[in-house]
Image (cartoon, rainbow, N blue to C red):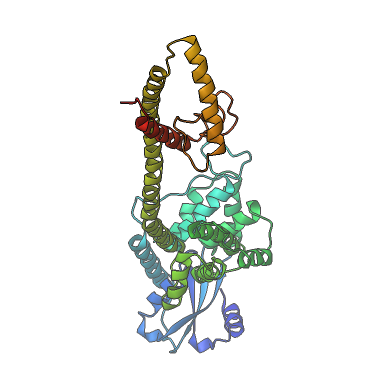
Amino acid sequence: MDLSKVAEWSRQAQVSPANCVILTGVPLDVQDETILEVLNTVKAFGRTKIRGRRGDKEGMSLFVLIETSEQPPNIDVNLNLVNAIDRLVDKCTQGASDPLTYRKLRVFSGVQPVPPGEEDYDSWMEQAAQMIGEWQCAEPVKRQRIVESLKGPAADIVRFLKVSSPVSTAADYLRALDTAYGSTESESDLMVKFGSTYQEPGEKLSTFLYRLDKILHRIFLKGGVRSEDLNRRRMEQVIKGALTTDMVAMRLRVTYSLRDPPNFSELLREVREEENWISARDRPKVGVAAAMAVPQVTSSEKEIDSLKRDMKELSTQVSKLLKIVTAASVPESPSKKTGLVVESDAKVRDAVVKKDHVMPVKPDIFCYKCGEDGHTRRECTGEENLRKVNQKLIKQSRMAGNSRGVL
C-alpha cells in the first residue's frame, strides 16, 4: 500500500498520520484481541487501537490500521511483527482448543432427499448453533469444524462466502447456510413470534424452554440478536411467557434478577432438576390416597361374606323349622284333618281381625326373597332383601320355640 492510500485511509478514519501504523501481511483469521495483545507489548506505541482492516489484492492477507497514543519511532513495523502475531495466534489456538474428544457436528450437504447418514437442515442447524457457543476454542478452529461437517452444495456456499468475505466468522457461516436452506421468515416476524410465545397449560417449563430457544436461534441466524444477548433475551421471555402457576417459573422469577442469566444448557439442566424434585415430592401423596382406598374395598368384601354366612345359617334354621312344623301337623284321620283345617281357617280370620292386639300363634306366610307378607318366593316380583328375610326367619324361630309341643 503506497503512502497516498495510507494518508487517505488515516484521514477517513480520523487518525493523525503521526500516530498511525499500518500492519501488512496480517493473516485473515487473526482476531483484534490478539493483535492488540502483541502491540501493547511494544512500549514505544503506548496504548493502541485498531481503526480499520482492508484486504490485499490477492485476498490472502490483511492491512490493519493502528492508532497509537504515542508517536512511534522510525522503526520497521512489518513482517517481523506480523510473524510474532502469527506465532501468538498459534499459541492461543493450541491453548484454548477443546480436547481431542470434542463433540463433532453431523454431516450436512443440503441435498434433497436427505442421503443416508446425513442430517436434515433443521437438526443440523440446531446442533451447530449450540455447539459454536460451547466449543472452548479460537474462532479459526470453530470455522474449521463447521467446514469439516459440510459437503456438496452446503460446502460450496461456505466456500463462496470465504472468498468474498475473508474475515467471516463461524456465525457468518451459519447465517449464509440459513439464507440458503432456512425459513423465509423475516427478522421482524421472528421477533414478534418470539415475544408472543407462551407456555401452554399442562406443558412442562423445560418443553417450553426448548420450544422458545429454537425461535431465538433462528433470530440469531437472521442477525436479529447478538450472541452476547442470547441468554438475557431467553431468560426475559421465559419469565414473561411462563404460566403464573408453574412452581419452577416462580422460583426463576425470584432469583433471575439476582444473577447473570445462564446459557441454554445450564438453564435447561436447572429447570429439569427442579421439575424432577417437584415430581418426587408429590409422588408419596398418590401412594397415601391409594392406601386409603384399600380399606373401603376390603370392608365391602367383609360385609358380603357376613351376609353369605347369615344366609347359610338361616337356611339351616328354616330346614329345622319345617321339620318341626311337619311333625306337629300330621293328622290322625281324615275327619280330624278336616276339622283341623276348618279350625285353622277360623284362627286365621280371627288373627286378621285382631292383628293389632294379638300376635299369631303360628308363623305367617312371607316371601323368602323380598321379606314381605302374603306371597311366596315363586310369586315375588319385588327386589331381594336379605336383611328383612333374616329378621322374619329369626322372629319365626323364636315364636316356634314358644309354641306348645315344641321342644
Instruction: Give the position of the C terminus as an image quadrant.
Output: top left
Residue at x 41%, y 75% (from the top left corner):
259
Q: Nearer the viewer, residue 224 or 3?
A: 224
* Quadrant of the rendered image containing residue 93: bottom left
Residue 142 appears at what percent x and percent y? 46, 58
Point out residue 65 in the picture as x, y percentages from the top left corner. Answer: 52, 78
Left or right, residue 336 beside residue 38: right
Q: Is residue 229 above or below residue 345?
A: below
Residue, x 62% and y 63% (percent of image)? 222
Give the residue displayed 40% in from the left and 59% down from the top.
278
Q: Position of residue 157 (x, y in %)?
A: 61, 52
Q: Residue at x 37, y 41 (%)?
A: 298
Would you place residue 12 above or below residue 104 in this image? below
Q: Is residue 317 above or below residue 170?
A: above
Residue 188: x %, y % from top left: 68, 67
Residue 103 lies left or right of residue 147; in this view the side is left
Tell me if I can see residue 401 in this picture.
yes
**Front residue of this view, candidates 191 and 113:** 191
Q: Nearer the viewer, residue 169 or 61?
A: 169
Residue 197 vs residue 395: left or right?
right
